[in-house]
Amino acid sequence: MESKRAVDQHVFSGAFFKMLVFLVASLMVYRCKADYLLGAGSYDITGPAADVNMMGYANPKQNAAGIHLRLRSRAFIVAEAGNDGNRIAYVSLDACMASQAVTTAVLSKLKTRYGDLYTEKNVALSGIHTHSGPGGYLQYLLYSITSLGFVKQSFDAIVDGAVASITQAHHNLKPGSIFVNEGEILDANINRSPSAYLNNPAEERKRYKYDVDKSMLLLKLVDAQHGPVGTVNWFPVHCTSMNNTNTLVSGDNKGAASRFMEDWFDHRSVKREPSANTSRVRSKTSFVAAFAQTNEGDVSPNTLGAFCGDTNLRCDFNHSTCNGSNELCIARGPGYPDHFASTEIIATRQMESAIELFANAKDLLKGPVNYRQSYVDFTNISIAAQSATTCPAAMGFSFAAGTTDGPGAFDFKQGDTDGNPFWKAVRDLLRKPTEKQVACQSPKPVLLDTGEMLFPYDWAPAILPIQILQVGQLFILSVPSEFTTMAGRRLKDAVKATLVEKSNGKYDKEVRIVISGLTNAYSSYVTTFEEYQIQRYEGASTLYGPHTLSAYIQEFKKLAEALVLDTQVAKGPSPPDLISKQISLLPEVIPDTTPAGIKFGDVSRDVARNASFRAGDSVEATFWSGSPRNNLMTEASYTMVEFQSAPGVWTPAYDDDDWSVQFVWKRPSATIKWKVPKDALAGTYRLRLFGASKALMGKIDNFTGISSEFVIV
């Protein structure tokens, strides 16, 4: 597996040269243009790296047991010049999705600090959809079952990190300009539910070359005096390169792409000579690069497709089964069978394209900063154009089948429009859906009538936030769900048509529209009406029935019209705050112990003293350790690879936020694994562990441990 440092070297010669030429040619342009006030910020949201079930696959066995990459909140603020100008704050979270509870808490803290400067109207929190982050931070019961309910450490880490990143961005506000660019990435995503996509009208499908969107839209934020300060892009692909056997906290392909690009920018001019700075530890003032999520509902990073694990044959096309069973039908990434390699490949493809777009971004965003937002009760919306309504939330049988990225269990399968008598009987013990609900959700056979299940508190959301953020000719559609490819296309087309019509042609070809997925809250999936009929996983997870997309389109057109006509929209009903009702069943951390004569931090399996290693070799040491939940090491690290820069002087070189380092926890030990990068300097190194232990009476003590020295040749 090629190291992240090799990625730097691979990209350096081509993309960096192009960027260098562009930066030099544009230096005077940067210094004279200041269309907006711009700020960027970034903060650690990793949370508990042990014991907590990971959010995304709903696999009860997938509990965190270390760190592959730290998770971060990346915030961008764009404001009009002047004290009274409008502003927006866009935050990309290395989390599975946003959460209404998190959003509510973040806005409350921002109000305490800034008054009405940042509110529900102009703040967007979007999850990248990693399936390898700690769960337990959503307030609706359906999404916290496998995490054993609410996990305060997960929740607090995301809330505090989001607020900290926005605060940084606020304090960093300076005059600057935003450049925009778009380009295609052809080898980083595929449609994982093509049978549902093919049920869309043929004439509609003919308008598009691919059955997934291949376009990346990128913004480049440039300080008028000091040059680029950040970038954010949107490209549709699930963060499921790391499969459901992974137990190391990770931002998956998008989190990795962000780190790769930030490293590339920060170190792009560092010449790797023996006298150069050896540290790859994150700078506190780094350039911020966010790889945000968009309409990835039916989009997989596992580009080789889905195969049966027992026969190596392709899975059944319509149901994604192998001999009638779904468990063995698993999609394969480009690095199969190594999901770390697949993650790196998909991350690198996004990163390389982003660098190319970044280097060549020349189109300026110009015009107002504006926004419209409202809350909508999606359980009974009348769609005037279709004489139809939405339904209370419900999950279909195919929801339990999972996807080819992460199959479910038992005998569920995708594409099920009938259900199963046994599971219907089990369902009825929880709640039997009414005849009205069954008819409304048809042809979805209801497995969980979540919208009408209120004990011990709400199982699914009813009231959702929708939002449009405007920066010049760019419109960001914040949706609290996962739109499929065609559903996203229809929403964007409808909003654009409204903007053009209501503005008397002011907004036309220059308008750029992007969907920000999984934003401000979460409510599973949104398919087209036609895709819903097939009842693949995405259709079965479209909560509010077959007309959910039509409801979104209707409500977003209202926001778009209000933006153009400069009118206000009704706030709508407020979503409930269920934090006080949350149940938490995750056991407390048990006391940490060591054998007699052994201290925390002592090495139990050491590196051979003065052993020699080369690039590509793996170096490991295991230490007696306390639980990572005793100290989250926020904005710090459990691990450090240290380089001897002078006799007796040890310099931090790599930490647990670096691709080459893994922190693995298994009580009572922690293991540091370092795969030596190709550009690691020759010399003497050692591995160092930082941690905290919990005594019998609950006292927390910090400790550190150091391995024997070894040599890189």
Image (cartoon, rainbow, N blue to C red):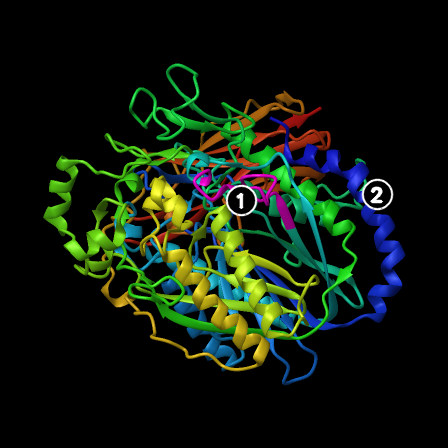
**Three-letter code for the amino acid on which mark 1 is drawn:** Glu
Q: Quadrant of the N terminus?
A: top right
Specify the segment rendered in magenta.
197-216
Q: Nearer the viewer, residue 322 or 259?
A: 322
Disc sitting over residue 203 in the figure? 1
Name the residue at the top extreme. 311
Q: Helix, strand, or loop for circle 2? A: helix
Q: Helix, strand, or loop for circle 1? A: helix
Q: Is residue 445 left or right of residue 632?
A: left
Disc sitting over residue 17 in the figure? 2
Q: Nearer the viewer, residue 552 or 575?
A: 552
Q: Nearer the viewer, residue 136 or 654?
A: 136
Q: Is residue 389 left or right of residue 637?
A: left
Question: Of tags 2 and 1, which is closer to the observer?
Answer: 1
Sequence-first tag of 2 and 1 = 2
Residue 395: image location, x then y, percent: 27, 48
In this rendering, the answer to whether 395 lies above or below 312 is: below
- Which secondary structure class fits the magenta region best? loop
Q: Nearer the viewer, residue 335 or 627?
A: 335
**Do the CB atoms of the residues marked 2 and 1 lie less than 8 Å apart?**
no
In this rendering, the answer to whether 28 lies above or below 649 is: below
For image coordinates 49% across by 68% down, the residue present is 557
